[in-house]
Amino acid sequence: MNKVLNYTKPILLIAALLFAKVNYGQDQPTIDSLFQVLRTSKQDTHKVLLLYNLSREFFNSDIDRAEKYSNRALFLSERLGYKKGIAMSYNNLGIINYYKAVYNVALTYHDRSLEIMSEIGNRKGMAGSFNNKGAVYTQQGEYALAIEQYLNSIRILEEMNDQEGVGKSYNNIGLVYYLQGNYDQAESYYSKALDILKAFNNQGVISDIINNLGIISFEKGEYEESLEYHFKSLDGRQGTGNQRGMATSFTNIGDVYAAQEILQKAMEYQKKALAIQEELGDKKGMLSSIQGLARVQSLSGNSQQALIYMKDVIAISSEIGAKKELRDAYDEISKIYIRQGDFEKAFNYKTRYAEMKDTLFSEQTKEIATNLEAKFENENKTKEIEILKRENEIQELQLGRNRILILSFTIGLVLALISVVLYARTNRERKKAFHLLQKQNESIKKQKDEKEVLLKEIHHRVKNNLQVINSLIRLQCAYTDDQVALDLFDECQNRIISMALIHEKMYEAHDLSNINIQEYISELSLNLLRSYRLNKHVELDIDVKVQTLTLDTLIPLGLLLNELISNSLKHAFTDEQENGVITVKLDRSHDGKFVLEIGDNGVGLPEDFTFNSAQTLGMELVVTLSSQLDGTIERIKKPGSYFKIEFVGLEKQRADIKSAMQSDAISA
């Protein structure tokens, strides 16, 4: 019997605030009661807790409503200056974005929650944030960083004698060992976690760990034992109404049946899982189920259908940054092509698999080893320099003494005393000048460092303020049913996000004067693609040969890209068109101008289209922003809708200002 590749990861235990118990199902009486109290509550900290609890109730049944009430709790907490409420809301939003597979946003929220928890001295909240950061790093394949965060969490929890929290962190460390293929070590940590957590009678958590033990049995080829674990876990999850957990159990049971070549049951359970995951919008879970369906199709001899499923896996994995799933998809596609006899394609995908595998398992290890080695060498060099300085000082003292003795014997005691006085005075003045210069250098360096920190903090605060504005708009959307108004709000949110992303990149950049434009355009395009949620496959063809741009140029350029890409996503692709391509190319011409080509292969524009005839705010913004960049825009005549924008940008203005300042300085 061939062993089936297991596509479902063991369950991570995500820490709600202070490791509070998470309700896995929607308790309607509790929700009704919370709404009743909410209607009559004042705008105080009690209302913050009501909104937070509502978000938790909706968590596993309606994640969009969960996000809505978390944002309302955050807004009220900031208005009241209630720091604990702010930290709670950030933590909750981080967990929500984790399950929506928006990992960078989730990490930002958890960093902010940890910062505030540390500020107010809430150690249990700090432990929860460390644990949740570890969960995000695990999903991103950053295993060394994940272990570091889990150990930070365990240290705090052991100091507080919080055994429940320690048990959850043990489970998560077990997952990291599982992902590295060390199944015995993973099983050891899962068993430790189960022994600790049984005492707390938390059926949801116990079901998750039993699920993990079932996966270990699967990896060892113990299929009957694995089924026993998974059905036991499924019973517990059904008892608590945990829809997400039930989907995971269905996927795992389907994998075991496939390994036993009971293909009809395998297909049945994978389809049950996929139906729940699509309803919840759980992209990570959808990956597991689609992979399982592909495997069953392959075992059934339907290689073409299996390839279709696996290419969906690659698209979703690339979108959410799931490196392990992407690696496994390359490996499975290679095996399918081998069975088809297409060895060239099989070799290409096997090569991609090997490259991704090396990246996952060696990237972090090499980086840590390099850092430790560099640190060790620097410490040794520092000690050697200190020893040489001491030896030089001793030698200088000895030379000085010998010089005084020679002078005293040759020109007499008086001249020797005069020489000593002159030497001492000169040496004192030299030291004084040296110390003054050293202080000036330290002062200049301190001012430079403070300015850089201040600039980064300004960009960070601007980004946070834009996110607050975005949250306000999202809250306002909940109070209107007017579709036209909702569409306008969505457009405003996308424009705000494009600007916030620039300031986020400035905050992360090592060189504050420039931003990596390739990275920015890619993230902006993916954010818009996720925002519009089209029911068809749209590819992004991004070719950027300009490495960096200044903030002055990038802000209007980002808004321009936002308008044109949004226009393509809204209007270009009809129901009859299965696939679409949006193209963005940025380069420099021979005369130094920037050339932006952007468009889509959709239905195209009317033949008589002109920018003067387009009476929409979006096209007005496009024309205005092109002019602001000191550029021109024209339509390219080819199938679809394509535009060419040549612009000078604000780089030239900055260079002119710098040249003028230098000329003034020379004149002065």
Image (tube, rainbow, N blue to C red):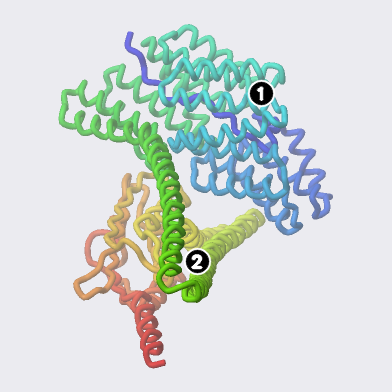
Q: First in sequence: mark 1 or mark 2? A: 1
**Which of the two residues, 121 or 377, is positioned nearer the viewer here?**
377
**Which of the two residues, 517 or 476, is positioned nearer the viewer here?**
517
List the residue tagged with mark 1.
Answer: 240
Rendered position, 367 above or below 85: above
The percent position of residue 470, horizontal first and vertical second, equals 58, 59
Spatial CA span between label 1 and label 2: 59 Å
Residue appearing at x 47%, y 56% in the figure: 508
Farthest bottom residue? 667
The percent position of residue 665, horizontal first and vertical second, equals 40, 87
The image quadrant of residue 93 is: top right
One can see residue 524 in this view = yes
Element marked by disc 1: helix
For the residue marked with disc 1, what is the amino acid? Thr
Dot in front, 1 or 2: 2
Which quadrant of the figure contains the C terminus?
bottom left
Residue appearing at x 65%, y 40% in the figure: 126
Dot 2 alpha-carbon crowd within 10 angstroms: few under 14, some 14 to 19, many 20 or more: few
List the residue tagged with mark 2.
Answer: 445
Residue appearing at x 72%, y 48% in the figure: 120
For the residue marked with disc 2, what is the amino acid? Lys
Rendered position, 594 above or below 482: below
